[in-house]
Image (cartoon, rainbow, N blue to C red):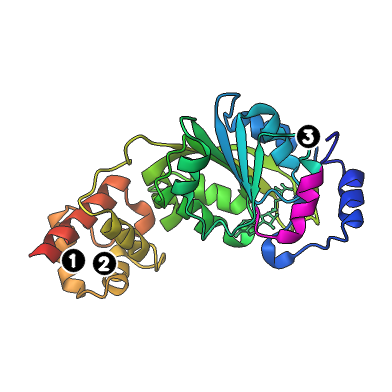
Amino acid sequence: MEKLSNINTVKDILQRHGFTFSKSLGQNFLINPSVCPKMAEECGVDSDSGVIEVGPGIGVLTNELAKRAKKVVAVELDKRLLPVLDETLGEYDNVKVINEDVMKLDLNKLIEEEFKGMKVCVCANLPYYITSPIVMRLLEEKLSVTSITVMVQKEAAQRICAEVGTRQCGAVTAAVWYYSRPELLFHVSSGSFMPAPKVDSAVIRLNIRKEPAVSVKDEKLFFKTVRAAFSQRRKNIANSLSTGLSMNKQDIISLLEDCSIPSLKRAEELSMEELGKISDRLSDLFKN
Ligand code: SAM
C-alpha cells in the first residue's frame, strides 16, 4: 500500500475502521515516512530470511518488512486492528498476523513452526509500557535470532546501550550486554508519531552474541545478583547485595574480599567480569 505512513492515509484508515487509540496498549503509530524503511534496512532482513514483528499497529513497518523478507510474522494484541491489517497487508502473501500477547506466546515454538531453515530477526516499534519486559523476554528465551531491532524511548535506548561499568548502566544494561552487543542506530522525534508521545525515541539493534559476554556457573543466580546489585543504586554493593539477597552484610563483605572487589564500590562501577565473579562465588557458597 502506497504511503501508509502518510498522516492523511493513517487518519483515513483509522476513521473508516472507527479505531480509537488505546493509551494502555502503548499505541503511538508512526507517521514519518522515512523511519520504517530505515528500520527495515537496518534490521538486516533479506529475501532468504524471516522476521518477527511485535505490535504491527496498522502495518506501516510490516509493509516495509514484507517487501524485503521471505516471511513476516506480526504479533498484535489488539484484535480491533485485525481488519485494518487485512486491508493494509492484503497485497502480501508472506505475512502472517497472530492475535496474541507477545508476553504469553511461545516464541521458540513460533520460530520452529513458522521459519524452518530461515535466519530470523526481530524488528518492532515497541509499546513503551512494556519495553524492558519485552526486550528481556526476547533475550532470556534464547531465541535463535540474529538480532533484535527495536524502537524504544530515547532514555531507555541510552540506558540499554550504555557500557557496563558506567553511570547510566542499570540491571537491564547488564542483562542486555550479557546476551548481545547493543548499538544505538538513530533518533526519532516525538512528532513522528500519532498521537505524539511526551518523549523522543531511538532505534537500537541488539546483535545477539553466540556466547554470553561472561561465562557463569549459574545463569539464574547471575541475574538475581545483577538485580540485587542495582536494586539500590545510591548504596554501595555490600549494602545493596546484602539487602537484595537477604544475606548478612559481613558475609557479603568477605565474599567481595575473596573476589578482590572493594565493598564500597557501587553497582554501576562493576564490570561484567566482576558481576560474574560475585555470582560464581555466591554459587559456591550456596552449594556448601
Ligand atoms: N508498529 C506500529 C507503528 O510503528 O506504527 C505500532 C507501534 S505501537 C508503538 C505498539 C503496538 O503494539 C500497538 O499496535 C499495540 O496494540 C501493540 N501491543 C501492545 N501490547 C502488546 C502485546 N503485549 N503484545 C503484542 N502487541 C502489543
Decide if residue 106 is on the left or right side of residue 187: left
Q: Where does the N terminus fall, quadrant-wise?
A: top right
For the stretch drawn in magenta, the main secondary structure is helix
Relative to residue 197, is residue 240 drawn left or right?
Answer: left
Q: Secondary structure at mark 2?
A: helix
Measure how far apart labels 1 and 3 are at the Cα level: 63 Å
Which residue is at 16% across, 62% downward?
255
Q: Which residue is mark 3?
A: 91
Task: For residue 195, say whether it is visible.
Answer: yes
Q: Is residue 82 magenta?
A: yes
* Magenta span: 76-87
Drawn side of residue 102 relative to residue 24, left or right: left
* Type of amino acid at the residue the image marks with label 1: Ile
Image coordinates of residue 109 in percent, x first then y, are: 45, 48
User: Disc 1 vs disc 2: Cβ atoms closer than 8 Å?
Assistant: yes
- Amino acid carrying label 3: it is Glu
Circles 3 and 2: CB atoms closer than 8 Å: no
Residue ID at (65%, 33%)? 40
In front of the other: 203 or 112? 112
Residue 239, x across and y down, in percent: 29, 70
- Residue named by callout 1: 253
Q: Label for residue 202?
A: none
Where is the C terminus found, in terms of image quarters? bottom left
Q: Report the disc number at residue 238.
A: 2
